[in-house]
Each structure stands twice: as C-alpha cells, then as structure tokens.
Amino acid sequence: MTDKAEVVVAKQAQIVPADGGLLPQQSGDQMIAMIEKIVMTPEIPIDRLEKMLEMKERIEEKKAEQAFVRAMSRAQANMRPISADANNPQTRSKYASHAQLDGILRPIYTHEGLSLSFDEGDTDKDGYIRVLCYVSHEDGFSRTYHKDVPVVNAGIKGVVMMTPTHANASADSYGMRYLEKKIFNIAVGEFDDDGNQAGNPVETITEEQQATIQDLLDSTGANKALFLKWAKVKKISEINAGAYNSVVAMIKRKQK
C-alpha cells in the first residue's frame, strides 16, 4: 500500500467507531454516501469493510422505518370516522363492513405508499384463528399486526347458524375489519360490536378508559342515566372498546 493510500484509508476508517456505531454529526444520507465511497477503496481491511456494510444496512433500515411512520401519520391525518353500513340482527346493532372500510381507507393509505395484505398464522388458542395483517411501505419497511378470533358457528342463543366453513370465513372477515380499524385508529359512527357474528365476545374499554369517561361526565355535569341509555349499556364498563373514541368525542362536544 502506498503512503497516499494509507493516509486515505486512515482518514476514511475514522468515520466508523470501534463499536460499529453511528457518529451523531452525520446524517443518514451522508453516512451512506460516505460508506459507498469507502467501499470502493480496495485497501480497506475486510473486517472494517464488513462493519461499514452492516452500518449502511442499519441506516437504510432506519430510514425506511422513518418513512413508514411519516406515511402512516399523513394517512391518518386524512382519515375521519366511518359510518356503519351493515346490520347485525342478533345484537340489533350496526357495524362498518370490510367493504365499507376498504373503499374509504384504501385510496388514502395507498396514496402514501402503504399497502395491506392479510394472511392466517398459528395460534395456541384452541378454536381460534389468527388473522395477520402485513402493513408495508414502498421504501421497504413492513410491520405485522395480528388478531386471534374464535371460530364459533352458533348464535347468541346457542343455535347453530352456519357451517364450520362459514364460521371460519366469518371469523376471518371480523379479524380483517378489526385489524384495519385498529391499525389506522378508525372510529365507527355506530357501536361496532359485530364481533358476535364470529362468536367473539365484545371487547370492552379498559379501566383507565372508564375513568376517563367518568371524569368527563363529572366535569360536564352530564346525566349519567341518559348517557348510558344513549350508549345502550347498563354501566360504563360495558362500553365497546371500538366505540371509545366516538364516546369521548361526543362528551367533549357537549362540554364545549
């Protein structure tokens, strides 16, 4: 190696700390450009080259994740509560169908470079299916969400209402709808407790959410009996988790 090459290598190698970490003063793009330039230098030792390539991979993964988060934020900023378009005769309630959710949400999230794909995975819960949703961004980052849904072919009164195949399809459909609402934090205009269609017990709000609603009711001086009647429940703890955002928004509107 010539003296000049030794100087170049020594200077370039300084950008990689001994622990292979990143130097804070360099931006991701600057680091990648610098690493790519150094990799073209044949005099770089193999072990140092491997660290640089690992660093480049970490930087690119972080950039892709940041692009994913920004895209998700922009998409949710353009999303609003969705009205219910289907009826569940068993619970006499309305819910937003998957077609309704998909028709409204897909143009928004795909515009931001996001895509959804669904699959089924393994679960250790007997009688359940695990619905998977892969949320991917065009820059390469992907995040996986899942929901375990019971496969039940009987209605609320215990009467068999569907074949095992239909019960599985119903559970799968519910899981897809649940995940799509959860991923994008979507509120539905009506209380969406159609999980009963898949034999799924209604998921209620947490103790912390109960306390929040109670505090809001107290601060507004609202008539609790009328509120519970409006919410179609006997007590606050029975409020559907999917309706929480709508309930809070309604109380705050009354407060204003």
Image: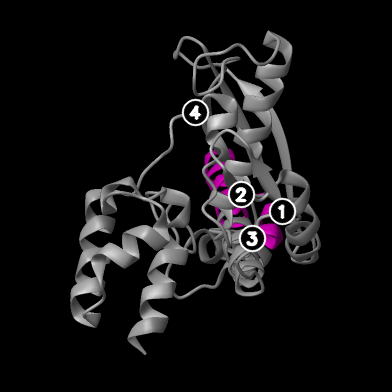
Residue 226 included in the magenta stretch of the image: no
Residue 109 is drawn in which quadrant?
bottom right
> According to the image, label 3 marks what residue?
5
Q: Do the residues labelled 2 and 3 touch (CB within 8 Å)?
A: no
Amino acid at circle 2: Lys
Percent position of residue 79, x then y: 65, 69
Q: Label 1: which residue?
A: 85
Q: Give the range drawn in magenta.
A: 35-61
Q: Which of marks 4 and 1 is in front?
A: 1
Quadrant of the image for the C terminus? bottom left
Which residue is drawn at the image coordinates 43% and 74% (left, top)? 250
Q: How far apart are marks 2 and 4 (CA)?
A: 16 Å
> Pointers 4 and 1 in contact (CB under 8 A)?
no
Would you name the residue on which mark 4 appears? Answer: 200
Q: Give amino acid for label 3.
A: Ala
Task: Looking at the picture, tell me which residue is in the foreground, 157 or 21.
Answer: 157
Indicate the secondary structure of the residue bearing disc 1.
loop
Q: Would you say residue 160 is visible in this rendering?
A: yes
- Give the mark nearest the N terminus, 2 or 4: 2
Q: Name above or below for residue 173 compared with residue 123.
A: below
Specify few, some or many for label 3: CA neighbours under 10 Å numbering under 14, 14-19, or 20 or more: some
Task: Return the residue nearer the eye: 127 or 57.
Answer: 127
Q: Name the residue under label 2.
A: 94
Q: Is residue 78 above or below residue 203?
A: below
Looking at the rendered structure, the secondary structure element under dot 2 is strand
Cα gap from disc 1 to disc 3, whole angstroms: 70 Å
- Distance from Cα at disc 4 to Cα at disc 1: 20 Å
Say which quarter of the image contains residue 49: top right
